Every structure is written in structure tokens, then in C-alpha cells.
Image (tube, rainbow, N blue to C red):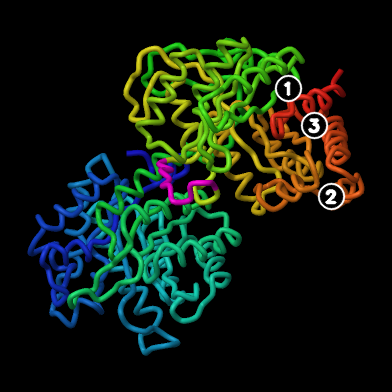
Amino acid sequence: MQDFREFLEKNIVVFDGAMGTMLYQKGVYINRVYDELNLSQPALVQEIHREYLAAGAMVLETNSFGANRFKLQPHGLADKLEVINFQAAKLAREVAGDKAYVAGAIGPLGIRIEPWGKTSVEEAEAAFLEQARGLLAGGVDLFILETFFDINEIHQAIKAVKSLTDKPIIASMTINEDGNALYGTTVDVFTPKLEAWGADVIGLNCSVGPKTMFDAIEKMRELSQLNMIAQPNAGLPKVVDGRMIYLCNPEYFGEYAKRFIQAGVRIVGGCCGTTPEHIKWVANAVKALSPGGRKIISVTSTKKPLKGANIEVVPLEKKSSLGEKLAAKKFIVTAELTPPKGCEPESVIERARQLKEAGIDAINIPDGPRASARLSPLAMSLLIEQKVGIETILHYCCRDRNILGIQSDLLGAYAIGLRNILAITGDPPKVGNYPQATAVFDIDSIGLVNVVYRLNNGADLGNNPIGRPTGFVVGVGANPGAIDLDLEVSRFEWKVDAGAEFAITQPVFDVSLLERFLDRISHVRIPVFAGIWPLASLKNAEFMNNEVPGASVPEPLMERLRKAGNIEAQREEGIAIAREALERLRPMVEGVQISVPFGRVESVLKVIDVLG
């Protein structure tokens, strides 16, 4: 198998879930020594490994968390320490084969070491050393040191493993609900220490549920550039009919897996209370969001075909008229028309006709903006292309469809002649006029770009051939005014890596925000269309400031609208502001998207007049 370090650099990795939870569910009570089951019930241990492998785990942890001298001795098993660990690795290795990696699991010794207890650091290191020796002999690919709350103790574990081998080491602390390790050690203390001591991956596991762990992981990300792991519990346990039950459902767990990945975590798994069903949801999240590697690439018109695919990828300049103009580096002007709330598209078609006559290159058709129910954007795009003869850019959001429906829609869109896609995650239902509606979000915009890239390379999400490949020009959204600009830039990198060929920004009112954003993405620059919104009134500007994420109307512009007087004067001032923005933005970007507020095409025409 590929070296784990190399594999990690190119993939988001799924670890398995709780071994103890599964043993308990299968009737092994907590008065048993779970590590000894490697000898007395090996088939049961392997059964659990197989269930996690089938659920999508890429790494199986050995059943050896407590297999150290100090924990085994009270049960008369200290003399079997090495064989228990050897067998733990052997059992996992046999199940994993060449389909998964095996991580040697080492937990705390169960005693206090100096300066908190009588056991010396040398004795602690020796105990970890003999456990690691057994795991190494059994064939592990890496080591995971997990659920440590004493940084002094995990230091000895790291030293012990490093003295034996150069195999990768994952060092994982555990925290309280307050976000600190159980001895009160804060994230900003233990994070740099774990890195300095030579761990390959650092992170958190156990004790808390996804939410608390996510908050702590975000802090760790600010302090270290090492790859990180997150293995939360399935929430906090509750006593139900005398048993401790973890109530965090797998779907919720999977949603947090997406958040961990989006925050930059490279390894996601589960701890206490998690089952193969939880890991299945984690694996689905990874499939949806995996950027296919963190390496920053230089984007060209097309990527290489998927491995093994004997197909001819459509080059950018032949995908569509928009693709041809992108390849030729022409300045592109698009306008956004929102589909009607009813089933009468004629007024929107007429506006599209006016825009075409004015020289607009393409019409953007948003997909349920503000989570509103409107005429299908796919149908609206087709009607405009058929009746007006101008290309559309179909906004396609992930909110309303599962992964099967998404692939079907995209194949259908291509079959009827649509060629340009803007991949967006979508506004959650609670912001719209149907807050009780449910959202799907099987994938987000990054995952959607991956789906389109695969279709463009002749394969579906499962890497099954689809015959002739699609030839979509794929765009993505960008938010220069994002509150967390680091996260926005990181997600933009992933979108580019996934195959995005152009980007459209949120409406830009503060040009300095766009300048800052463009500077931050210079290493992964693809054509950027700046969003232009001709403000219709002061009230419209207030809405943009308060209701539209990433749209920031600076106070000087707000004051200009206040001084304008009546609504008509405010509208003209809004157009003037948009014209000024367009003149300033044009040298910085490859195109613009101009919104058509309240369907007023004349506002757009006045704005683009500055382009000559």
C-alpha cells in the first residue's frame, strides 16, 4: 500500500469508530478486559473490524487501547502484554488487507506519572515502549496515541514510539466541555507542544460531542499547520433503562464531519458511542467534500482524465460560447435574472431578450435564491436558450437534492443542451419563505464541482463509466466579504482543485474587499466575475447590509443614498454607484455579473453603458 503520509496528503481520511461500544452492544459487559478478547474471542473483534471497513473506514484501529502493563496487571494479564498487542495488530491487519491501513491504538496508562504521581517518566516511556513493540511486530502502518489528558504522559508515548520506528504518529488529546484538557491545559499550550515533539498529526478525541470538539479544533488550526484529526463521541451519554446510551444520531454526526473537513481537518472518525452507521455518514461526507488532495495546482482549461478512463475530454474552448470566450481571455458581461414565482416565464424571457440585444454574453439563472420557491431554474434556462438564443449559466444548488438526483439533473441538463453550471451550496430553508422545509445537503459546492468534474471525465460519482462525457463549463461562487476570510480562501482553493473554471463573487460595493480577496487567491487564480448590484433604494441597501451574507455597503455609499431624496433619485444614485464600481473593477477581473434588481433591465443597461 501507499505510504500513509503520502496517502494523507492526497486524501481526506476516514477512521473507524468505537470498538468498546460495539463490543458492549454485542453482549460483552464492561467487567471484561476488552483487550484480552484479542486472544479469547478473535472472531468477534474481527467482525467489528469488518463492519467498520464495510462502512467506509480507511483506517482500522487495533483493539489495544488499554493493553499496557499498568492496566493489564490487576487482571493477571501483564505477562501476556506483548502477545495481546501483537494479536490486536494481526487481527486488524487480516481484515484490512490492502483495503485499509492499520493504526496501533495506545491509550493512557491509567495511573498518574510525575509530577502528579509516583510513576516516573522513564517508567511510563518503558511501558509505552513494550506496548508499541508488540503492535509493531503485528504489522501496524501507523500509531495513534489517543484520549490523553496529561501532556507529560503523551510526551513519553511519543518518545517511546519514535525510538522504535519512523512510522507516522497521531497524537490526540481529550478535552472537557470547557475546551481544555482534563488537567486544565489549554489548546494554545498543548497544540505547539505536540507539534514540537514530532507528531505527524495532532487533534482531539473522546469525552465531548462534535460541537465542543469543533470549537476546539478551530482554535488548534490557528496554532498549527500540521494535519489534524477529530474523533468526537456520539454526543454526551444519557442513562436510558439503566444503560449509558449515546444519543447523537449518525446523520447529525455526518453533518459535523462535513464541518470538520471544511475547517481543514484531514482525518475524521468516531470515539465512544459511535458505530459503523456513524462512520458510514462520515465516509459519505468525505466522498462529498474531498478536494482530492491539498496540493495547490495551476489551473488550465481541462484536467487530466480520471485514472483508467478511455475518453476524450471536451476542451474549454469547445464546451460552450462562454468557454470559448474564457479560453480567449475576453472580458465577459453576464446578467442575473431570477425565475418567476409562478409558471409564467414570459416576462423573464422578454428581459433576457432585451439584455441579449444590449450585448450581454450570458444570462445567470439563480436556483431558489434566499430559499424561495420559484419556477425551475433548469426549465427557465432551457426556455431562454430556445426562445432568445443566448447562453445561460445555470445556478445549481445542493440544498434540495440528494446525490442521485444531482447526477440525474446534471446529465439531463447536458442532454437538453445546457452547458454552463454555477455550483453553489444553497441558502438553508430557514432563511426563506418555507422555513419548515427540510434540506438535503448530501454535498456542498466543493463536492458538486467534484461531481461535475467526474461527469466531464466520463464517470459518475462511483467512478462508473457513463459513456460520452459531459462538457460543462463549471463555475463557483466566492465571497470577498466573508467574515472568516481564511476559511473562504481555503474553500476557494478546494473548489479550484476540484475543477472550477471561473468564479462569480457576491455583490461588490467595497472594492478594497475584492482587492484583498484577489490578492489572497493569486496562487489559484481562475477567471473571476465581480458581482455588481445596482442599488434600487436606501431600503434595498439596508437589506443588502443586513440580510445578504458577504454584501457590505460602506457607510459613505449609504450616506449618498440618504441624501439622494426620493426613491427615483435613490435609484439613479444606485446606478451611479454601480457604474463607478464597474469602472474600478474592470482592470482587476475577467468579467462581471450584473444583477437585475426587481426586473429593471434599464438599470443594467445604464450600468454597462460605461463599457462602451
Quarter holding the C terminus is top right
Q: Nearer the viewer, mark 2 or mark 1?
A: 2
**Which numbered disc flags the more N-terminal residue, 2 or 3?**
2
State the residue position of label 3: 588
Q: Is residue 81 magenta?
A: no
User: Three-letter amino acid code at disc 3?
Assistant: Met
Is disc 1 placed on a helix, strand or loop?
strand
Residue drawn where x is 82% and y is 31% of the image: 582
Tell me, yes or no, whether the two marked residues, 1 and 3, touch with CB atoms within 8 Å.
Answer: no
Q: Which residues are magenta?
A: 432-442
**Which numbered disc flags the more N-terminal residue, 2 or 1?**
1
Q: What whole-number distance in Å separates the C-alpha atoms at marks 1 and 3?
A: 14 Å
- Provide residue 244's location: percent of width, then percent of height: 24, 73
Q: Nearer the viewer, residue 182 or 55?
A: 55
**Which numbered disc flags the more N-terminal residue, 1 or 3?**
1
State the residue position of label 1: 333
